[in-house]
Image (cartoon, helix red, strand yellow):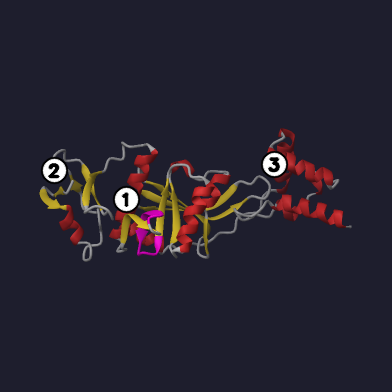
Amino acid sequence: MYAALVNEKLVTAYEEYSLLPNYQQLNTKIYRCPRCKKRVILIVSQSKAPFFKHYNVSQGKGEKEEHALSKQMLCTALVGAGYHAKMEVNLAYRQLRADILMQNSISFEIQCSPISDIEFDHRHNLYEKIGIKDVWVVGRRHFLHQQLRESQKKFLRFNQQWGWYYLEINPYEADISLKYNILLSPISRKLKYQIKKFELDDLGIRNFFNFMPYLKRYSLPDVQFQRQYLHKKIQQKTGYGLQVAQLLYENRKSVEDIPVEILTQYYLPKQSCPLVQYLQKIAEDTKTK
C-alpha cells in the first residue's frame, strides 16, 4: 500500500519518507487505510520503496508474524530517532541478510524462532569478520524467566554500563525490554536482574541508547536456604544434584562442609558454577598430593 490517510488527507509513502531528514518522529502520525480506515504504519525497506502496512496487534500471533512486525516496528523507531536503518540488507557477498542494519555498523537480529548453536555461531562469526556488531533481540519464545536455559546464553551481551544484558521485543505491547545486571544465584542458579522497558518509538529508542542505570548490589543469599536447596536437588537426583553428590563423595565432604563464601557468591551467566569448580579443584589437588 503506497498511500494512506492523515486527518482525512491522502498522502503517499514516498512523500512521508522524504520528510524524514527534517521530521524525525516516524509513525507518530496516525496513518489510516483509505479503504477500511484501520491503522497502518510506514515501513522503510531495503528491497522495496517505502510503503504502508496494516498494524493490528490483535492478529498475527505466530512466530513469522511476530518476527515481521517486530522488525518493522524497530526499524521505523530507529529511523524516527534519526538513525540510518534499513531492513533485510544483504552482507558478506549475500552470505548474511541483516534483519535491520543501522548506520552500516550494527545489525539487529530479531530471533523469534529456535536457532541452533551452529547456525548462531556461523552468523556471529561472519558479522565479526566483516566488522559489524550483531545485537540479538529475542521474541517471546526466548524470554528470560527465573532460570537461564542453555539455549538462551548465546543471546547474552556485555557492556560496562549494563553488565551482562539481554534484549526482548514485544510488538504486541510495542516495547523493548532490557534485562541487565544479570547474575546467577550460587546454588539455586536462579536469575537476578534489573529490567527497564522502552517504547518502540523515536523517544523510546533515544532513551534506550542513552540509558545509564545504577547497577544495584543484590542482597546476599540465605546460607541455610542454599544448603536446603542443595539437599533437595541431591535427593531428587537431578543432573546437577547427582554431579554435586558425586563430587562431595569423592572429596569425603557433606553439604554442611561447603564454605559460606561459596554459598553466597553470585556468578556471571556464562561462568561455570562456583560450587562445582570448588569441588573439582579439591579433587584435583588431592590427586596431585
Query: Residue reaching furthest right?
Result: 289
Q: Which residue is mark 2?
A: 34
Q: Which residue is mark 1?
A: 73
Tell me the SS state at disc 2: loop
What distance separates the C-alpha of mark 2 from that of mark 1? 21 Å
Observer able to see residue 259: no
Q: Which residue is mark 3?
A: 240
Q: Is residue 101 magenta?
A: yes
Of the pair 48 and 143, the residue shown nearer to us: 48
Give percent across and percent down for residue 138: 44, 48
Q: Which residues are magenta?
A: 94-106
* Residue at figure coordinates x 56%, y 59% from the top left: 216
What distance separates the C-alpha of mark 3 from that of mark 1? 41 Å
* Residue at figure coordinates x 53%, y 65% from the top left: 160
Three-letter code, disc 1: Met
Q: Is residue 134 left or right of residue 264?
A: left
